[in-house]
């Protein structure tokens, strides 16, 4: 049995030549290293490192691997180096710097050119309803208010002041002049309705409004004023309208003029033009006092420089005056509504307001 085991022929093993085995092993090793290097490069998002690994491990193979056997172009992984990399720096935000308010305002003033607004302004004492009521040949106050509204619109008035407005007339004016805004309308009570400032809503915005109290016809009533801004140019101007006591109430007229002068100077101190309209019930004294105390001029001429220089006649008790950048031309006295709508001439003028600078929030 042992003999047979010892002499049995063993199956022949097919051996691989030693040189071929080394070649296959080397190729597998190179391939393995190549796969690992590419995986590391792709994982880290650094294509350059992957390309270096390919070059180191595969040598000539990496140089010829850009084309597939069929000639198709492969994606060049080195282009991933063009992708934005995360910044190695950390940004620390410091304290924000800002100009002091005075310096910021000075820069704004210097950067802005003077702004101009040119418009037609009117002065109208419309004769209150209680003054006619079927007497003196005048029609009812509401009918006359409608005539007034029609006249103002036909004359192309943009801004104006009214006196002796009654509640029933105010409603007619507002309904017949829908493209205009009114201040104070009825917001200051019954006595506050007497004096109204109005303007075209599509041309101007009311930036501020206010009133001071003074004596008219032995009653304490509000004296309204508004700050208007031209929508197109940004130019601003203050608008005041007033009515001083009539007849023998000279002391009340003098006191009222003093209140008006104080208000004008207070508003002028803001650096914005000021215009005042009204029935002053004086042909000369109001003009002379205001012109001398405020430097204002009338729409029909005259000045207070070096004494009182009156405008040319005819002089009315109604006035339009302005200063601080307000100028006038084309002054006219309109009798179209005389004895129909009112017992006063309606005055019109072309006005230009020039405001040197604009500072939001300015208050007198």
Image (spheres, grey):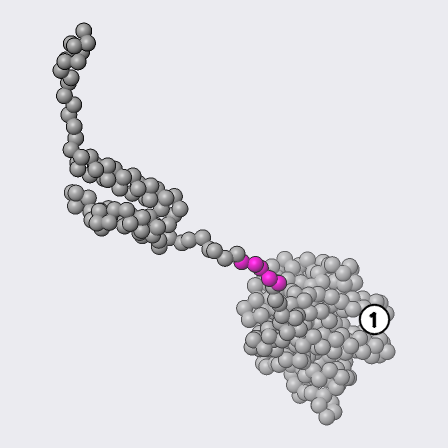
Q: Residue at x 19, y 9 (%)?
A: 2
The quadrant of the picture occupied by the C terminus is bottom right
- With 203 as the anchor, is 248 left or right in this view? right
Looking at the picture, how far across and down is residue 346, in whole percent?
A: 66, 74
Q: Residue at x 80, y 66 (%)?
A: 221
Q: Which residue is mark 1?
A: 215
- Assign the magenta stretch its main secondary structure: loop
Q: Residue at x 55, y 71 (%)?
A: 233
Above or below 60: residue 264? below
What number of labels is visible? 1
Which region shows up in magenta?
91-95
Residue at the far front in the pictured view: 3
Q: Nearer the viewer, residue 284 or 240?
A: 240
Q: Quadrant of the rendered structure where residue 124 is?
A: bottom right
Q: Residue at x 65, y 83 (%)?
A: 300
Q: Residue 10: say if magenta.
A: no
Looking at the picture, how far across and down is residue 3, in whole percent?
A: 16, 10
Looking at the picture, how far across and down is residue 268, in whole percent?
A: 70, 77
Res 279 seen here: no
Above or below 328: residue 207? above
């Amino acid at each position: 049995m042992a003999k047979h085991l010892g002499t049995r022929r063993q199956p022949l093993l097919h051996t691989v030549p030693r040189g071929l085995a080394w070649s296959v092993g080397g190729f597998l090793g190179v391939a393995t290293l190549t796969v690992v290097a590419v995986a590391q490069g792709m994982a880290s998002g650094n294509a350059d490192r992957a390309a270096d690994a390919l070059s180191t491990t595969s040598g000539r193979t990496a140089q010829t691997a850009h084309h597939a056997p069929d000639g198709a172009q492969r994606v060049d992984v080195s282009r991933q180096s063009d992708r934005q990399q995360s910044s190695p720096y950390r940004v620390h935000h410091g304290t924000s710097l800002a100009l002091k308010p005075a310096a910021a305002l000075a820069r704004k003033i210097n950067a802005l050119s003077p702004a101009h607004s040119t418009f037609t302004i009117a002065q109208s004492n419309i004769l209150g309803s209680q003054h006619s009521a079927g007497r003196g040949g005048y029609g009812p106050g509401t009918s006359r208010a409608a005539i007034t509204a029609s006249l103002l619109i036909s004359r192309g008035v943009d801004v104006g002041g009214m006196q002796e407005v009654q509640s029933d007339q105010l409603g007619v004016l507002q309904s017949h002049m829908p493209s205009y805004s009114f201040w104070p309308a009825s917001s200051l009570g019954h006595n506050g309705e007497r004096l109204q400032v109005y303007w075209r809503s599509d041309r101007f915005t009311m930036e501020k409004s206010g009133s001071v109290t003074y004596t008219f016809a032995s009653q304490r009533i509000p004296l309204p004023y508004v700050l208007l801004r031209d929508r197109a140019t940004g130019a601003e101007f203050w608008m005041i309208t007033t009515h001083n006591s009539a007849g023998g109430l000279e002391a009340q007229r003098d006191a009222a003029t003093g209140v008006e002068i104080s208000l004008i100077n207070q508003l002028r101190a803001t650096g914005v033009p000021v215009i005042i309209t009204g029935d002053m019930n004086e042909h000369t004294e109001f003009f002379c006092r205001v012109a001398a105390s405020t430097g204002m001029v009338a729409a029909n001429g005259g000045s207070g420089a070096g004494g009182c220089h009156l405008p040319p006649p005819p002089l009315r008790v109604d006035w339009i005056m302005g200063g601080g950048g307000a100028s006038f031309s084309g002054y006219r006295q309109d009798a179209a509504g005389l004895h129909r709508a009112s017992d006063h001439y309606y005055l019109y003028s072309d006005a230009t307001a020039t405001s040197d600078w604009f500072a939001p929030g300015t208050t007198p």
